[in-house]
Image: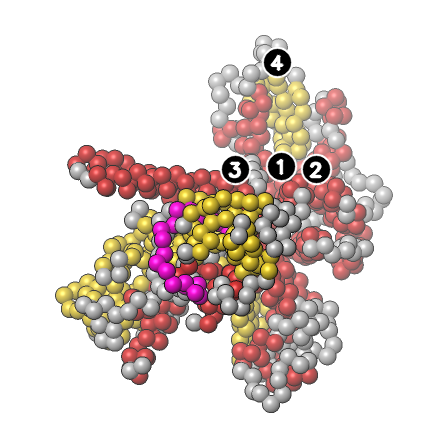
Amino acid sequence: MSEGGVLILGRAAGRDLLLNASDLIEMLPAVPVTPLPGPLPGIAGVILYQGEFLPVLDWVALPGWEQSLAEATTLAVLKRRLALPLEFLSGALEAGHEGVRIDPSGDDPWAPFLSAICTFEGSTLPLLDPDKLIDWLHHRRTER
Amino acid sequence: MDQPFEDVWAECEDLFAQARQTLASLKESQPAYVVQASVNALFRTTHTLKGMAGMLGFPSFSRSAHRMEDIFDLMRKGRLRSTDSLAETLEAGMQALEAGLEGLKRGRPEPEDYLHGLRRELGELEALARPLSGESQDLSALLDLPAEPLKALSDYERTRVTSALMDGIPIHGLVVCLDFATFDGRLRRFSDGLAHQGEIISTLPWEVPEDREGLAFMILIAGASLDLEVLAAEPGEILEARLLADPVRVPQSLRAEVPAELESSPLPVEPEPEAPTTPVSQESEILRLPAQRVEALEARLMSVAQLRDSVSGLLRGWGGDKTEAPLEILGEMEAGLLNVQKALLQMRMVKVDTLFSRIEPMVRTLSRDMGKPVRLTLQGGDLEMERGIVGRLGEPFLHLVRNALDHGLETPEERRALGKAEAGSLRISASQRGRSIRFDIRDDGRGFDLARMEEKGLAMGLLQPGLSASPERLHRLALEPGFSTLDRASQISGRGVGMDVVRAEIETLGGEILLSSEWKRGSLVRLTLPLSRVVVGCLKVRSRGQTFGIPLGNVLRVQVGREVYHGGDKVKVLGLEIPFESLQVCLGQGDPPEGQRAFVVLSQPGGTAGASLEIALGVDEVQGRAEILLRSLPELAQIPGIMGGSLQEEGILWVLDPEVVLGLAMDSLMRRVAHV
């Protein structure tokens, strides 16, 4: 699956997750998000990033979310122009050091936007697939 | 593509844009020296294009550019006279080269001869310019000059002297004696001043008077008279004018038909009151920058704006009298930053006229070739668009104009039979709609044959048998690859490879294309292209704790009163009853429970006051007008009714898309009526 590169380990929406560093532009300290002037599923609002508006994901809109959302400390800026608010960053690991990867199970509510479930130091960690996540967001928009 | 190659392509595009402008000026009535300067500029342009094509490895392009260069050389040597038909042939030639360049950029193979379609016209011109005796006339001996400087004249300069004298234009010499320290700048200044008075043929080194030090030159100029006053010589500078050759000394048998104004005006005549055209020597310097540098500068400027906002926020937090002065300074800084942002935006923009200037000769050539007279109207050329977008619209417009003339407009005979004017009408207009530019291409031709299109669509499997297709769907069939209702393709169009190219290019630019028509009445092709950034004049309003901007072009009236309105009410404005709906509701934020006292009457643009759609849009507060830099929202953050936003001191100001808001308001009002 991942050959070389770095995986970022973080926590969002009460769940530990992995992000492929090659999918990211950068990690930013969290800044206030301006809400949009109307409901938009999956998007919490926008921030100004490099002179342009950048949408920020609203984890609450993702299926399976049941907990209260902790305040984000970091924003992971995806190359596909979406910021993911993270509660914290736990670290990074060389790709290949994570354990066996398996396809996400259909029982996992995040399955539609994961590329794999990895095992690392006894934990199972979902690896986020930005393309799938953004496609899912687009799909939600058109469903409205 | 490599940056150096990008630069060469971009420079070629600039050269073609300049050539279009210069060629268009050849058809206007202008003094001979201005025409000469234009022809010289075109000669240099084609020469440069030839060199660049060689450098890029396109020998065939280089050969064709060389042929055009030769024609311009014949013109500048006076062996071809500038006429409208010559200018049209040259326009067609440059157009063929420009289209060829566009093809090369897209990776198409080089044709054998870019000027193949003009081979007859160009051959005739070359034959016409060939001297009958095998050599050209030289009248430079008529110049009242010593032998040495006379020998120093180049072939080209001799040709120009001869041509001017044969045209009845006298040759003057202006001796200038200048200081060593400043001679270059001063000589350039004199040359620029003289360029308004005639054609500068040569600048020769001249003997310095015995009692003087410095450098002297003799400037040879062809013109009716010289006005030395305007040259504003400085103390100590010597200016001395003399007549070097009078056309009356040209043997009658060699004299061309002398222009009436020169024949009847004894020397000296009044100088031209003002120069209509900027001489080539005064062209301003063009600075070429990679777009990324401007983008980086914009991003830095944005960081500065954010810092300014942070400081402003801190000061407001502290409060008190002492913060008033710094806040005022920050306000000025904000205005300054907006000006710089606008200036940066300006650097990326070109007028729509640059696109129109390519369309005009295209239409003329097609109209002539097809024998269909056309009345072309172009509107909105003053609007500005990003240079990159304009550059990519050339090919789509070529297809659209070809289609309009080939398929849309009928022949003069057909039009007469239908009771239409013999000349067809083609109207191309550009208008700004918020963060988009809209191009409407309308013709008054036959329109789309929807029955035939349906038949073809079914045959091609694009439509499902048994299901009726809407007119919109049928029109859109024209945008499908390979779709054509013509059984035989003409030289111009009909191969079904045009409109899909238009669609692909417009969609790549993030735009939309819409087709509509009325049978036998005409067609409309509407292109809507997004502008990434644009400065918009807005009315600032507050609603549910957020600030919004409404483009002023859509605001008919603003009213703040005592009466409270709720969604579905009617408000009376100037005797008219207008439905009221709250902006909050339009944006899906629910009804304001207390109602609203302020509203803005929004109108659909383009309609007359009586016929247009109007809504009284309820808001909490009206704050006034502002000019803002609008940034578009990324697709994931787009919500209906919002066209973009702008960073303001109080946070993000959301700019409404009035047409969409009107639609949302109407939907909501209808739901209220239906109690849904």
Label 1 sits on what residue type? Glu
Say few, some or many: other residues with alpha carbon within 10 Å of mark 1 (under 14 / 14 to 19 / 20 or more).
many
Contact flag, marks 2 and 4 (Cβ < 8 Å): no
Specify the label residue B199 is tagged with: 1
Instruction: Please tell me whether residue B676 belongs to the stretch shown in magenta.
Output: no
Label 2 – label 3 distance at C-alpha: 21 Å
- Is residue A95 or residue B641 the one in the foreground? A95
Please, what secondary structure does the residue beneath circle 2 have?
Answer: helix
Q: Is B550 left or right of B285, judged from the image as shown?
A: left
Q: Position of residue B455 (x, y in %)?
A: 65, 85
Label 2 in the same subunit as label 4: yes
Instruction: Please tell me whether residue A79 belongs to the stretch shown in magenta.
Output: yes
| Residue B282 visible at all | yes
Q: Position of residue B157 (x, y in %)?
A: 71, 34
Answer with mark 2 or mark 4, whichever residue precedes in sequence: 2
Q: Which scheme is used to colour this image of the protein?
A: secondary structure
Label 2 – label 1 distance at C-alpha: 9 Å
Q: Which residues are magenta?
A: A61-81
Q: Is B265 left or right of B152, judged from the image as shown?
A: left
| Residue B23 visible at all | no
Label 2 in the same subunit as label 1: yes
Specify the label residue B160 is tagged with: 2
Say few, some or many: other residues with alpha carbon within 10 Å of mark 4 (under 14 / 14 to 19 / 20 or more).
few
Place residue B674 in its image quadrant. bottom left
Specify the label residue B271 is tagged with: 3
How many marks are shown on the rendered structure? 4
